[in-house]
Amino acid sequence: MSSTTQHIKCLIIGSGPAGYTAAIYAARADLKPILYTGLTPGGQLTETTEVDNFPGYPKGITGPELMEDLKAQAERFGTEVRFGLATKADLNASPKRIWIDENIEITADTVIISTGASAKWLGLENETRLRMNAGGVSACAVCDGFFYKGQDVAIVGAGDTAAEEATYLSKLCKKVYMIVRKGEMRASKAMQNRVKNTENIEMVYNSETHDILGKEMVEGVVVKNNVTNELRTLNVTGFFVAIGHKPNTDIFKGQLKMDELGYLDVIAGSTKTNIAGVFAVGDCADKTYRQAVTAAGSGCMGALDAERYLAESGKH
């Protein structure tokens, strides 16, 4: 049962660059947005130490600092930022109904979904420890590859994304070990050929990551051959995981159109979903780019789409 009910013009579910940018534009358009942060205020970037590729920060900035800047900017224009997790949704209702933390009911004329996507990890103890302490474990080669220029690194994965990221790293790093669980990759033939024709990429087939070495920073990776059980240590200083992402869209299943992985479908050139007044921005709808700046751009689009929807329906 709902203990609280509130009606608003614009509800933004999720923070991060997409959510906060949507909030900035929505607030400036006088939509009086309320943003619920989700369990990780600021999204994936709060787990990133250095952000060097976001425009406007020539000396770089930490992920948490960037998110605090975006949050402050959204609040400056009147966004109300609240901590809470959307746990249930009825988007076909008029107005739309969202429940926060099970017992707070929000009704909204427009909903902007910016719930993001979570990287899949191997689940190793040292992987988690080094990742949380900015010790050289990453799920984004484009974001963090620059820090390993001229060094040896390893990447885990066998699909197109892993192949693409391995190729990207090969242009920066001295050597790239690509750890593949089976005896062949599952990437497209074109991507496989690109990897195999890159001299400084060494394929490590039939292998799984056994352990990651290093106290404060990655100092090596132990791989286990799952055919011979032989252990081998790769002398690397960076470890990249490219085994996929899971979009945080489960509560919208059966209501919003999504692909087989759970990424929300939007009408090309917009952020519109299959339900009028509901918009999807950032990584929950983007499995291609997954960058902070593209997420921010789509957040701007989502707010503009919401404003136009309200104007056309006579609610703004």
Image (cartoon, rainbow, N blue to C red):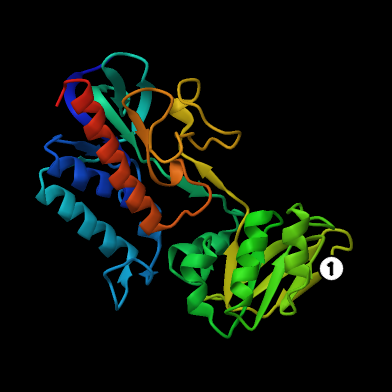
Residue 191: x, y in percent?
72, 60
Question: Is residue 85 positioned above or below 228 on the image?
Answer: above
Q: Is residue 135 left or right of residue 299?
A: right
Q: Can you see residue 288?
A: yes
Q: Name the quarter where the N terminus is drawn.
A: top left
Residue 105 found in image quarter: top left
Label 1 belongs to which residue?
230
Query: What's the residue at 74%, 53% (across, down)?
Result: 188
The one nearer the camera, 242 or 170, is 170
Q: Is residue 45 left or right of residue 315?
A: right
Q: Residue at x 25, y 39 (%)?
A: 304
Give the percent coordinates (x, y) of residue 171.
60, 78
Q: Position of residue 315 (x, y in %)?
A: 16, 22
Label 1: how many Cα within 10 Å (few below 14, some 14–19, many 20+): few
Residue 196 falls left or right of residue 81: right
37 over 127 or under it: above or below? above
Residue 111, image quadrant: top left
Say what amino acid the circle numbered 1 marks.
Glu
Q: Quadrant of residue 260?
A: top right
Residue located 49% across and 64% down the image? 131
The total of numbered circles placed on residues is 1
Confirm whether residue 223 shows in the render: no
- Give 160 or 62, whichever is nearer the viewer: 160
Residue farthest right in this picture: 228
